[in-house]
Image (cartoon, rainbow, N blue to C red):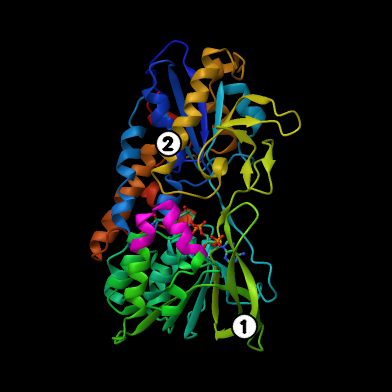
Amino acid sequence: MSNVETHPNPIRIAIIGSGPAGFYAADHLLKSKEIQVEIDMYDRLPTPHGLVRSGVAPDHQKIKSVTRVYDKIAKDPRFRFIGFVEYGKHIHLEDLEKHYHIVVFATGAQTDRRMNIPGEDLRGSHPATEFVAWYNGHPDYRDLEFDLSCETAAIIGVGNVAIDAARILCLSESELKATDIADHALKTLLNSRIRDIYIIGRRGPVQASFTNPELRELGELEDAAPVALGEEVEPDELSLEEIEKNGDEAVVRRLEILKEYASNTTLDKGKRLHLRFLLSPVEIFDRGDGSAGVLRLGKNELYRSEDGSIRSRASGQHIEIPAGLVFRSIGYQGIPLPGVPFNHKWGTIHNEKGRVIDPGTNAQIPGLYTTGWIKRGASGVIGTNKTDSAETVACIKEDVKNGISLTPGSTGNGRVEELIRERQPHYVTYEDWLKIDSLEVARGEECGRPRLKFTTIEEIFTALKGAGYVAEHFGADKR
Ligand code: NAP
């Protein structure tokens, strides 16, 4: 460890999680004129960037280029990345309290929501979140198996994750090969027999949560055609009222795109992507061997609820579609962190504007903050986390000014390296990550792809060792 000191008494900050929310929080803190900070950003994986690496679709390379901004933030001498160190396993709240003034939890939303219908656990029925993590090469999910030998897949939910999962199932060989999709997923997808993909919304198109660029993209696929039904795309009276009241131009354009898809009669492509609305999953029937075979859906009608929102209710009619593969894409959900108050209903840390709150007393817990999906739930795009983190950082600055923070002891001058070396000698720095990054890009170049990811921890460390990695090497770092 070198001795680049930036301030004699900086506010020491630990950020748990290295996705967009964590990086934007770091950025706002580093740019702050009011407080002088030093930041350690932890991640349980040896690779940073959270869902930018393991969530953003592999054919959306432009979106992934946001990591250049994170690389720039990481260059600041007051910032360190400490990867492959897991909160709750290698490092605990009581450790952090001894070494930092402020702890910011930015762990995102790591699990899925359940449909709670019979047949949900049959083979072939999966959370879309797992499919996404699998095709993006997340080490915890790379060994999952997805059987793509059936002809029809159904995706429940009409958000952007559903659209991503459907699009990946539709990409042609040349489209897939232009992405950084994990190699195991590429092989499986190239052998896929799926020809019909259903995306199913319980409410109407006006209430769908996907965005227009993603919807439009479905019409530009090489070997798949989007299909919609005229009667489902036509808004009902309640939805028309809603459009009129809100004057939402984006919804008007969305309906135009869907109408275009509904009138599409030239279905000369190899795959069809059916956008269906006003249907709720009721049951998945067993094919007879413990795997999904048929999806039963209840037809819905819309009504205005007491709180004024438009909701769906069963009309009593049903339809069935064959589906050997069912993805539930009905939202990500946060998981509780040891020692941090959690709202199980919302799947978020108890907080007010990012200040962690004791649910019993509603009092602030000094020094603990949160940002991103674990703060507000799984909503918004990458950039939303910038504003979200600004709100949290504003609270931190105000509190520090008012003397509210943790009070780390003087032991080891508050430094945490010794502890980390002891608990996880194989931690990874940002410099290590940059080596992994360039090795992956070089591997990709060899086969004409933007990147070829390492998808196991073992592969990552073998590559790193080849590039001169030694364990316990804080010395190579900036401070
Ligand atoms: P989402 O946008 O919240 O969509 C969830 C969908 O699931 C909604 O259509 C919702 O319908 C439906 N749903 C919820 N419970 C259901 C149930 N019991 N039965 C049937 N349907 C149900 O979530 P997401 O798609 O997981 O996306 C998460 C966030 O990441 C979003 O903000 C999204 O925009 C963002 N994201 C962005 C991109 C991109 O920018 N390209 C890509 C991926 C993700 P109701 O509306 O009726 O509840």
Toward the right, the furthest residue is 360
Residue hosting label 1: 318
Residue 104 visible, this angle: yes
CB of mark 1 near ligand 1 (< 8 Å):
no
Q: Which of 80/106 is in front?
A: 106
| Residue 400 % position (x, y) | 53, 16
Residue 461 percent location from the top left of the image: 44, 50
Give the magenta range: 238-253
Left or right of residue 12: residue 256: left
**SS under mark 1:** strand
Q: Are dots 2 and 1 in contact, CB under 8 Å?
A: no
- For disc 2, the marked residue is 387
Q: Which amino acid, mark 2?
A: Thr
Q: Is residue 9 above or below residue 354?
A: above
Relative vertical location of residue 14 with respect to residue 10 in this rendering, above or below: below
Crowding around mark 1 (Cα neighbors within 10 Å: few <14, some 14 to 19, many 20+) is: some
Q: Is residue 259 above or below residue 150?
A: above
Closer-to-camera residue (99/218)? 218
